[in-house]
Image: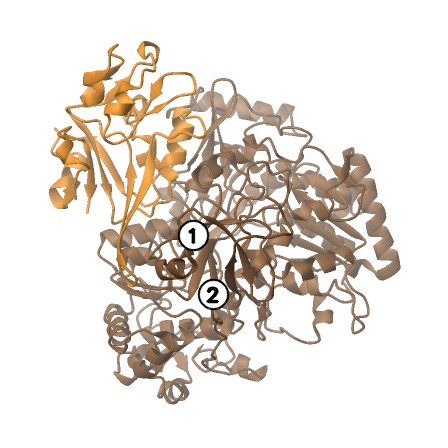
Amino acid sequence: MKSRRQFLKISSLSAAGLVFGGGLLETFADNLLKSNQSYFKGPYDFTRTPTYCEVCFWKCAGWVHKDENGRIKKIIGNDDDPNCNGRFCPRGTGGVGMYFDEDRLKTPLIRTDERGKQSFREATWDEAFDYIAAKMNKIKEEHGPECTALFTHGSGGKYFGNLLKGFGSNNIAAPSYAQCRGPREVAFIATFGQGINSPENTDIRDTKCLVLIGSHLGENMHNGQVQEMSDAIDKGTTIITVDPRFSTVASKSKYWLPIKPSTDMALLLSWMNVIISEGLYDKEYIEKYAFGFEELKAHVQSFTPEWAYGITTIKPQQIRDTAREMAHAAPAVIVHPGRHVTWYGDDTQRLRAVAILNALLGSWGRRGGFYNPAKASVPHFHLPDFPTPNKDWRAAMGGKYKLADLALASGVCEATIPSPEMSCSIKGWIVNGTNLINTLPDQKKTIAAIQALDLLVVVDTMPMEITGYADVVLPECTYLERYDSLRISQGRVPSIALRMPAVDPLYNTKPAFWMARELAKKLDLLQYFPFETIEEEIDWELKQVGSSLEEMQRIGVKLMDREVDDLYFGEDEDVEFYTNTGKIELYSTALEGEGFDPMPVFTQHPEPSEGFYRLIYGRAPMHTFSRTANNPNLTDLMDENTVWVNPKVAKEWGLKNDQYVYLENQDGVISDFKIKVRVTERIRWDSVYMVHGFGHADKRLTRAFGKGVSDTQMITNVMLDPIMGGTGMRGNFVTFRFDNKKTEV
Amino acid sequence: MRYAMAIDTKKCVGCSDCVVACQTENDVPIGHCRDWVVEVMDGTYPELEMELRSERCNHCENSPCVRCCPTGASHYSDGGIVLVTKNECIGCSACITSCPYDARYVHPDGYVDKCTFCLHRVKKGMQPACVAVCPTKCMYFGDLDDPRSEVSEVLKKRKYKTLIPEAGTKPQLYFLI
């Protein structure tokens, strides 16, 4: 195939906004690097510097533009980046607010009172590192290095990960697994031998039918996907949306199925029933690639649309019509695997049903279905071997969750709470860029785990609930003020992107690489940090792939060769899948082997009692997690969440638009703060809806404090997925209260 | 030359990226905006329809704001774009009252401010910031007098409407429906 590099568009350096001509700039950057290798001081002479966004996980590459005073002005997308195609989403565009937020953490802090009290004294970096190193060494001596853990979300994780592995622990967890997409990965690996990853390998650009089940694409603003969906709308693609809420994308769909919450599995099984009984499945594909079709056929025989109607409230004719639409478009059809799929504890099985449905339609490996992604191959410098830990978080799980292929954040949290069954619980946490109090469900449990720790280090840019519990707070500079490791993306075309500082860090803040390396010095682990500066490491890595730091500073994004042109399966191609049978497993031998149902079954989930409503939560396009709630630019767009209430329910309770109420869940937990009522037809009468990430309890967040309700606070009924340990978070019901005597707002 | 914008309500997801992009491009102070998103709902559950619209100054051909401005600060510029000259504006707000689209606000520095179709960018051959950033590419900008401009092409192909046509202002913001 042709080299992708031939298509590589080098951005014109004479384009608007640049002061220097190309040649001059190169020389300038060269000199700057030569004379200043230790730390790349604010390159104020660049009017634009490359970055990749850190506001969400999509990591779009872009340019940071500065005004004539060297002040950050705006951030825009890099035209050459396949993740964003030159267009940032509101969060990325509003990333400037992260830098300008005057509530940022400014200097290292050491706790002076009990955990959770937010009492700290300012410390020097050296003091902070001495404190941490002493505690870590003490944990190592008394309990072993395995009794430490890292929770991470974001770019700094790589360096703290190396530190921890060098120290002797592999308890490295990201909430994005057990709290978000883990069930999907396990389900797709069980079916196709391959996960979905991020960005997803969904070929939305070329699809003829996009099926979204519990996925509010557009409101979640997963940039590349939203862009492709928009192109698909232009081409007249059929969109089918299944959601109890009239989501934005529901309003753009040919079919909106307003399903009764918690019954999605019944609909999926019934779609399979129609597709098999009407002979609409891809017979050649199934015969050639699949294992267990006859078993599946027998299994779904009784799951008729009439059966599903009683459960889902979706009319049988609608179920048949939508199944036929999908089959008509096949194989250019995507039953989208979604994201944040941890709902009812049977999530791996539900996502298995999604995977099987795709298999029946023959969409995996086909144009308009799921393409085969390629990851850019960038060699990392070979580090000395890490010591082998004697045990990890799994030891505390009693043999459960063997199919989880990554560490569970909730599992590590669980393993921290002392119990008689455990030989040693975890004693030290490093938390990098994730507000665990609002990220993990069941706050009481998270706090219990924290109170059992000997050491809690929190690395963040902003004060958060979690920083209040820290022994040491390490203030990280924002992504606009630092280098980070290269973004290495998979996709139709693999790509790499550079992030470099646009300006010097404000206040006494530092990048994670520097922090991890300084800690490594104190812990005598410098062998795992062979490069003195991150620039040297990046430059070394880039030189292995024929580029350099200097080149990337100019272009920001580089597209790499695809090793093989195998975006889709060839006609009559023999494909071996990484499953036990080498086939697409409609009947999962891996699940059966672990004692689970080899094919998905329907489970009835509890329903709200009189006066209670199922709590459904989701995203708004302008906010990410709880991270952006204080961002001045994004708060300006949306500064609190609202509780969506159907007019029938509002009438019963006498609720008016914009009225504030408290929420109480079925376990008697009352929200700390009040939330504004939004009376809208867009939500069912048995549910309420709110956007995640509000109701911050940290007063130092001057814009976000006390605004709206934290859905996490209301989630106390966590339904664990027995297969992979995902935390199902749709099992809470709430009612309205007009006061909360415990708090004053 | 007649600059106009067409916005596809079928593709807009109401993310407000246009609003942030405008704020950072044009130094619009936080707490104010030159563009905004409107959501219009119709029906009862589950028979519902929703329209999302990114709105801004309509750069009307027959602009009440230009007519009523006592100092001439509000005026027509290149291609019919309606602008306010900062230092001629006395902040009397007559234009704000006269605008049927509520498209203007008083800048904290005392003058009236609003969308300029990013004339400073347009002059350089670039698109307005909101159009350039929109992830769904739901906005089209160009010269209506040029039959081959993006905006002319899309208005030929699609059904559209303008807002409050009965006000007789001849708005140059078109919504594709």
Coloring applied to the structure:
by chain
Residue at x-position 28% and y-position 85%? A277
- Give the mark nearer the N terminus: 1 vs 2: 1
Q: Amino acid at mark 1?
A: Asn
Residue at x-position 37% and y-position 68%? A364
Residue A468 is situated, as x and y percent measured from the top left of the image, at 70, 45
Residue A35 is situated, as x and y percent measured from the top left of the image, at 64, 23
Is the residue marked by circle 2 packed among few (<14), some (14-19), or many (20+) residues within 10 Å?
Answer: many
Q: Would you say residue A105 is visible in this rendering?
A: yes
Nearest the eye: B28 or A277: B28
Look at the image and give the colour of chain A: brown
Left or right relative to B35: residue A710: right
Q: Would you say residue A193 is visible in this rendering?
A: no
Is the residue marked by circle 1 packed among few (<14), some (14-19), or many (20+) residues within 10 Å?
Answer: some
Residue A733 is situated, as x and y percent measured from the top left of the image, at 51, 65
Q: Which mark is residue B126?
A: none
Nearest the eye: A616 or A382: A616
Output the letter for the chain in orange.
B
Residue A264 is situated, as x and y percent measured from the top left of the image, at 41, 72
Q: Amino acid at mark 2?
A: Arg
Q: Chain under label 2?
A: A
**Which element type, helix, strand or loop, lies under badge 2?**
strand
Query: Gap between marks 1 and 2, in whole Å?
Result: 21 Å
Residue at numbered disc 2: A614
Q: Chain under label 1?
A: A
Residue A333 vs B141, above or below: the answer is below
Q: Which mark is residue A220?
A: 1
Residue B85 vs A102, above or below: the answer is above
